[in-house]
Image: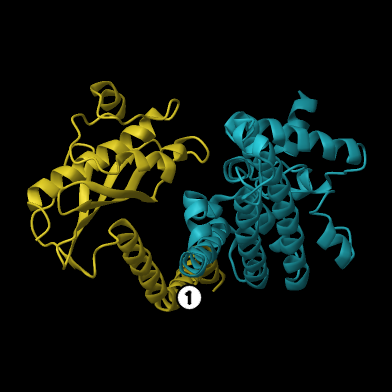
Chain colours: A cyan, B yellow
């Protein structure tokens, strides 16, 4: 893998390789928890905590975990951290715990966390993995926060729960706060990111080299056989 | 020798590593649980106590009712706390709503009239189903001592004076059903004693 600077590892998740808007991972929690800005930010922070911790642990254990059981091992580690976050939220931020509901335990199967464990933490050092987790987490949190804010302002007429003006509160554009509005705002944000990054994003980790099935894949052999035939 | 090594690498090491990781994670969870469980329990109790006092302001203290609790098709009574000074009771009901289980607390005075309703836990759609949990909407039940129907729409037609949220009828029904079950429970308890 090409050597990259620490700053680049940290910042790539914000725009260049934003997990939600560029890699299109974690769409389900993105759409479901961004009905308000505080919910979006809360979900983002909870996922970031899990992402950083799981990346660190998986990076430490990368030479110990046998290839055959790496996915179950990653899932156990991630599920452990998610449950810890769930306990802490329930105990110390019960209002956020009540708002996020089912989406906290669902962080376990968040593609971003498993994706970064498989693509980055299992191949890089502890510090780099922590930076990657933090960067991706910041990108995820910012996206959820911005999306939640747009949906809250337009769909409910409030800004972090505070009324902006009576007209907007009494006549909210409700569909934006509901599922169709989630898809619409999501698409708009992707369009904005594409506009600014058009042609600049090189998805190098998604070639054969970045594939988790690289070791068992027979694509080269198939191609060879096809050419011979 | 190499065969033994392969067996260890192929079969024993994966099982061993996964088992050890599971054990360590379980230990970490046990430690976290031992720290957070008392706080969670205290939070739940404080919230429930505050809700009881808010719903039945005339009550001085509460005692849990240990008799039979009502179970209906779509709802069941979770607990009943009666006021020690006979001011009434507060009933917690778990009912079915759009997003799944909905928990609500209903205050009922000594005459059997509703003093207040609050939804404490739900999984309904924010901004839509939650309109049926709004305190302004729930105020319509205050003073009512008898409901005729289990569905909010039927009740509105029956002329009790209650309405339902258009577009959130399942959530409205869930809340209404729970209140009806609470009134049934209050009747079964036989008033505050």
How far across and how far down the image is residue B119, in percent? 37, 49
Quarter the C terminus of chain B occupies: bottom left
How far across and how far down the image is residue B92, in percent? 26, 53
Task: Provide the residue designation for mark 1.
Answer: B28
Residue plotted at (69% across, 41% down)? A165
Residue plotted at (27% across, 29% down)? B151
**Is residue A71 in sight in this rendering?**
yes
Quadrant of the image occupied by residue A200:
top right
Quadrant of the image occupied by residue A126:
bottom right
Q: Quick check: A172 left or right of B168?
A: right
**Is residue B123 in sight in this rendering?**
no
Quarter the N terminus of chain B occupies: bottom right
Q: Quick check: A28 left or right of B82?
A: right
Residue plotted at (52% across, 50% down)? A103
Instruction: Report in which chain the residue with disc 1 lies.
Output: B
Residue at disc 1, secondary structure? helix
Could you classify mark 1 by the number of other residues whose Cα lies within 10 Å: few (under 14), some (14-19), or many (20 or more)?
some
Q: Residue furthest top?
A: B157
| Along the line of sight, the residue nearer the viewer: A38 or B1 | A38
């Amino acid at each position: 893998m090409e050597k990259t600077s620490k700053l680049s590892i940290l910042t790539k998740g914000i725009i260049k390789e934003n997990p939600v808007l560029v890699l299109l991972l974690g769409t389900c929690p993105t759409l479901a928890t961004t009905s308000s800005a505080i919910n979006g930010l809360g979900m983002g922070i909870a996922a970031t905590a899990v992402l950083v911790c799981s990346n660190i642990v998986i990076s430490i254990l990368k030479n110990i975990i046998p290839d055959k059981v790496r996915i179950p091992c990653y899932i156990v580690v991630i599920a452990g951290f998610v449950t810890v976050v769930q306990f802490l939220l329930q105990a110390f931020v019960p209002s956020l715990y009540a708002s996020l509901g089912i989406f906290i335990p669902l962080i376990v199967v968040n593609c971003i966390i498993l994706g970064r464990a498989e693509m980055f933490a299992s191949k890089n050092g502890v510090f780099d993995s922590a930076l990657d987790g933090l960067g991706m987490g910041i990108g995820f949190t910012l996206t959820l926060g911005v999306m939640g804010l747009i949906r809250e302002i337009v769909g409910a007429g409030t800004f972090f729960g505070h009324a902006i003006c009576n007209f907007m509160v009494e006549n909210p554009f409700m569909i934006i706060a509901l599922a169709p509005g989630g898809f619409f705002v999501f698409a708009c944000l992707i369009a904005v990111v594409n506009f600014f990054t058009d042609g600049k994003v090189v998805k190098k980790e998604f070639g054969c080299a970045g594939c988790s099935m690289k070791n068992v894949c027979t694509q080269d052999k198939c191609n060879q056989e096809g050419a011979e035939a | 020798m190499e065969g033994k090594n392969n067996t260890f690498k192929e079969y024993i090491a994966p099982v061993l590593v996964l088992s050890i990781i599971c054990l360590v994670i379980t230990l970490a969870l046990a430690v976290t649980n031992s720290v957070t469980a008392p706080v969670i329990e205290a939070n739940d109790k404080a919230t429930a106590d505050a809700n009881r006092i808010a719903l039945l302001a005339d009550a001085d203290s509460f005692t849990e009712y240990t008799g039979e609790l009502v179970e209906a098709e779509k709802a069941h009574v979770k607990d009943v706390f009666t006021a020690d000074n006979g001011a009434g009771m507060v009933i917690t009901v778990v009912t079915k709503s759009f997003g799944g289980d909905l928990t609500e607390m209903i205050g009922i005075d000594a005459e059997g009239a509703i003093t207040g309703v609050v939804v404490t836990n739900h999984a309904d759609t924010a901004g839509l189903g939650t309109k049926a949990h709004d305190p302004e909407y729930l105020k319509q039940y205050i003073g009512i001592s008898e409901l005729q129907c289990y569905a909010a729409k039927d009740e509105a037609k029956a002329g009790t004076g209650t309405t339902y949220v258009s577009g959130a009828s399942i959530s409205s029904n869930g809340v209404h059903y729970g209140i009806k079950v609470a009134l049934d429970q209050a009747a079964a308890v036989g008033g505050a004693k």
